[in-house]
Amino acid sequence: MIQLPKHKQLILFDGVCNLCNSSINYVIKHDHNNVFMFAPLQGNTGTKIIKHFGLDTSKTDSVLLYSEKNGLKIKSSAALAIALKLGFPRNLLVIFYIVPPFIRNWVYDYIAKNRYKWYGKKEACMIPTPELKVKFLK
């Protein structure tokens, strides 16, 4: 399995999705405790994690959050776990944990299904700046 530095969590995202890339840039900007690393779902790391956890690649259009301690979180649970680590006021989004996962994930899936139509798509995965390269796995 993927070895992460101690106390790090890995966010896997759709590397060609404009909404996903904007979200990753937002996380980078607000990750003041340097908790997160990143990898596109389309890369080697993403493929290894998807296979390890036996995820259906035709249904894996979700953000994934992996940590050695907590395993894998997907969809709305991953998004809320990420928000929790981003500090105030973003961490207040955890109030949505009271909403049953099937409802949260229905909303998440609706946005995911329409993300290319609403936000567009890149031809290739984003290339991190030299300063950010240490936060990204291929």
Image (cartoon, rainbow, N blue to C red):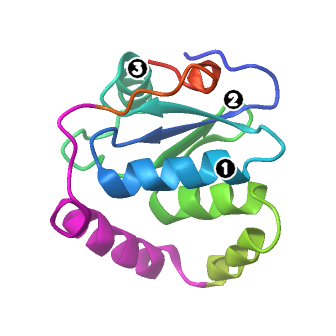
Q: Residue at x 82, y 70 (%)?
A: 88
Q: CA distance from mark 1 to mark 2?
A: 24 Å
- Kind of residue at disc 1: Lys
Locate residue 100 relative to residue 125 in the image: left or right.
right
Magenta residues: mostly which secondary structure? Answer: helix
- The nearer-to-camera label among 3 and 1 is 1
- Kind of residue at disc 3: Lys
Element marked by disc 2 = loop
Residue tagged by mark 3? 48
Residue range in magenta is 99-124
Q: Is residue 53 above or below residue 83?
A: above
Element marked by disc 1 = helix
Residue tagged by mark 2? 68
Q: Position of residue 8 (x, y in %)?
A: 74, 31
Q: Quadrant of the N terminus?
A: top right
Q: Residue at x 61, y 27 (%)?
A: 132
